[in-house]
Every structure is written in structure tokens, then in C-alpha cells.
Image (cartoon, grey):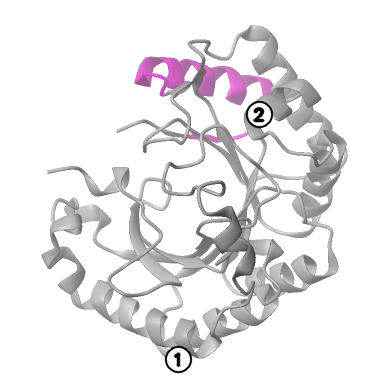
Amino acid sequence: MEYPTRNHPSSFHQQTIVYPVISRRSRGISIGINVSPTKRCTFGCVYCQIHVDRTKNAKELALLSPTIDLGQLRRELLATVDSAVSGRLFEEKRFGATRSDYRRLNDFAFSGDGEPTLAPQFPEVVDILRSIRRELALPQVKLILITNSTTLREERTIAGCDALTAENGEIWAKLDGGTEADYREMNRSEVPFSTILENLRFASRRWPVKLQTMLLRLGGRAPDNRWIDCYCAAVREILGAGGTFRSIQLYTVARPPAHGCCTPLDDGEMDAYAAKIAEETSLPTEVFYSK
């Protein structure tokens, strides 16, 4: 039986917005909120999961509305929380192998098939999650935004993040390199790297932020000393400008990527990178392996 952390489809039964996953980084049940029906994203990461295909059905996606049914969101979220809290979730084949210490509800997470902050209803969805969290008396459940860091200074994003972090919320913001070239090779975005750095400076001064960084073997090449040195220099520059990060989440490929050129690093390599980055940045590092 495949371990549940290696299977994260953004669907569940007949639901199209809310889906549960067993998350390595949450160390438990993370209920995903997919607010990207058109799969719109400002990144084209080489390691994006194979089920997120923005080219295969591009014409069909272009015809879809970028908005979601907020009433449907509420119904799906209530049903998914009930399945997770009651334990019925683990009766299903996909979740049956979940280890005992991961059988707990950790968070509601904005994730899914695109960049969630591009969703026109992002602040409204934050309000619904906050309301349900209170209604069901789940103060321990975090609200998490998993973001590629491209829109963090935009008005709609700021409003949503202010509301999200007002009660037990966190921003998990991506930084996948320390230079323009490294960033573009990994994330394939038209957004300038300078914008990513400025957004992270702004966000890390305003909200609780964890950096999330993918480390992998790209075309057979693992990150070299130059890559790590440049990455650490970029993090230190943000810290020197007054930013703060709760930690750096270092992870590698754990689910099938869209591009075969991406392969995971082994556990020993991940530990060595984590030790170097922790030493160079003086930040806690969290390591998430391929299995």
C-alpha cells in the first residue's frame, strides 16, 4: 500500500474545492482549499505535480470561471472536517496506512492547483475558514497559506493574510534559489526575482512566515556549493532588512513531478544541506524527505 504522504490529488470523492491530505510538513491531516479552478499560477515550476497540467486542457481551462461557489466550499469543508475528526477518513483505502501520530487535524491550507492569492475571492474564503474554525470549536487548527511569494504586497493578498494571521495563521512562502538564474531555472516565472525578495522582506516583517524551499536533482545535478551560498546570502539579506522567519522548510521530490528531469535527493544529502543552511542563516531548518 502506498503511504498517504506520496499521494496528494486535489480532489476528494465528488468534491471540487476541499480535499484532505496527509501532509509531511503538517505532520497530520491538512485540509486543502483549492481556490484555483482555472489552475492559474505565476510560476511554472519544473517539479509541479503531474496531475496539475495547465497545457493539456488549456482551452477548456480558459473558459472556466475564476470564482468558486462559496456555499459549496462551506458544505465541502464541514463534511471533510467531520470525516477527519470522526476517523471515517482512515477507513478509506487511500488513507488506511496513515500512521497513528498523523491521525489528527492540523490545518486548513490554501493550496491546490494554482497560486491561491490570485483567486478573486481569497479574502472572502479566509473569512469562511475563520468562521468554520470558530463554529466547530477548533482553536488548535491552523490557517495556512502556501504561496509562491509573487503577490504578497498586493492589496487583496494583504487583506486576506492580515485576517488569516489574526488567529493562529501562518504564511508558507516559497524561495527556490538565491539568484535570478537559479530562480528562473526552478520556477520558470516572468516575475522578477527582485520582486520575490522584496515581497519576502515585506511579508516577513508583517506576518509569521516560514520559508519553503525545494531541493532536488535537476537533470542529474544536485545543488552545488555556489547554489547554497547564493541561497543563504539571499536569506541573510532579507533578515538584514528586518525580516524574520520562523523556520526554513527544506523538502525534496516526494510525488511524481510533471517533468522527468526532477529526482529526489537522498536523506543524507538533505541532512547535509540543512546543516549548512542552518549554520549560514542561524535559522531553524525543518527537513522533509522523499518518503
State the residue at coordinates (72%, 29%): 184
- Which labelled disc corresponds to residue 28? none
List x then y, in percent, for residue 271.
Answer: 44, 20
Q: Name the element at disc 1.
A: helix
Look at mark 1 in the image and give the residue it sits on. 135
Q: Quarter of the image for the C terminus: give it.
A: top left
Q: Which residues are magenta?
A: 264-286
Question: Relative to the observer, which residue lies in front, 270 or 1?
Answer: 1
Look at mark 2 in the image and give the residue it sits on. 282
State the residue at coordinates (45%, 91%): 135
Amino acid, disc 1? Glu
State the residue at coordinates (19%, 56%): 94
**Label whose residue precedes the other's in the sequence (2 or 1):** 1
Q: Is residue 119 above or below residue 57?
A: below
125 with respect to 180 (left or right): left
List x then y, in percent, for residue 74.
Answer: 46, 86
Contact? badges 2 and 1 (CB < 8 Å): no
Amino acid, disc 2? Ser
Name the outermost residue toward the front. Answer: 59
